[in-house]
Image: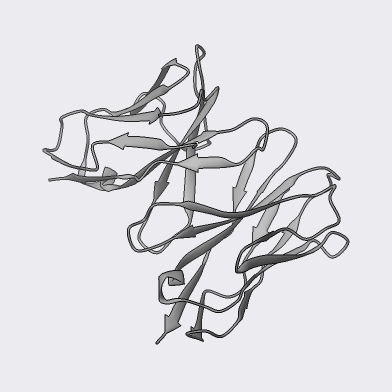
Amino acid sequence: GAVVSQHPSRVICKSGTSVKIECRSLDFQATTMFWYRQFPKKSLMLMATSNEGSKATYEQGVEKDKFLINHASLTLSTLTVTSAHPEDSSFYICSASVPAGREQYFGPGTRLTVT
Amino acid sequence: AQTVTQSQPEMSVQEAETVTLSCTYDTSESNYYLFWYKQPPSRQMILVIRQEAYKQQNATENRFSVNFQKAAKSFSLKISDSQLGDTAMYFCAFINTGNQFYFGTGTSLTVIP
């Protein structure tokens, strides 16, 4: 149980284009989903917290117009990197929380490369 | 401010031996949850073990156990009978009653055959 999928696993895009990453909770309903960015050999950096049906809460320093988050249903959240630039290249990870136990279950991550 | 500190950036252990990863945290709250996550080379984050602060008994999951010292705000992870598949980054994490999640900086563990 508590499986989170993420799609795509890898994406290469050209500078200036937009990329959408999907995060799905497969066997449970996730009222809250999180989006993280991870640099090589570093810890996870929380970008935003997404609650179903409401606007995402962004962490300080994260541009909400650049990283668009939509949480349209209890099983799906999307992150769109708009007008991507090479510095946006990174590993993006989503997670979904299980309210009862408070733990987060993580997707397998998406490797974004902007050329 | 709430923080999670992992003071061991890298550790290694011989296969079949026991290793302990340290984690300390800082909070003024009395009720919270603590977790250890494992991130192998595949980069999939996997929940290893969880501990509820109001429970005095240390959590165990097969070869993984914790030493939870609430007064000292310490939450170490012990891995017994280390296996090659235990090679990974290990992150200590804390969540408070406001559902704010904090990760430590991670410990890279290498199991040596």
Q: Which residue appears at 56% of the width and 85% of the height?
A: B17
Visual colour scheme? one colour
Q: Residue B82's x, y, as percent?
A: 52, 78
Q: Residue A10's x, y, as percent?
A: 20, 44
Q: Which residue appears at 59% of the width and 33% of the height?
A: A98
Answer whether residue B105 is visible to the viewer in this image: no
Q: Residue A17's x, y, as percent?
A: 15, 30
Answer whether residue B70 is visible to the viewer in this image: yes
Q: Is residue B18 above or below residue A110?
A: below
Q: Is residue B109 left or right of residue B102?
A: left
The part of the image, by quadrant, that contains residue B41 is bottom left
Q: Which residue appears at 68% of the width and 66% of the height?
A: B65
Q: Is residue B24 left or right of residue A33?
A: right
The part of the image, by quadrant, that contains residue A92 is top left
Quarter of the picture holding the C terminus of chain B: bottom left
Q: Is residue B35 left or right of residue B73?
A: left
Instruction: Count the numbered circles shown.
Output: 0
Q: Is residue A105 left or right of residue A13?
A: right
In this view, the residue in front, B1 or A26, is A26
Residue at the extreme front of the image, as rendered: B62
Q: Is residue B113 above or below residue B47?
A: below
Q: Residue A84's x, y, as percent?
A: 22, 35
In this view, the residue in front, B103 or B2, is B103
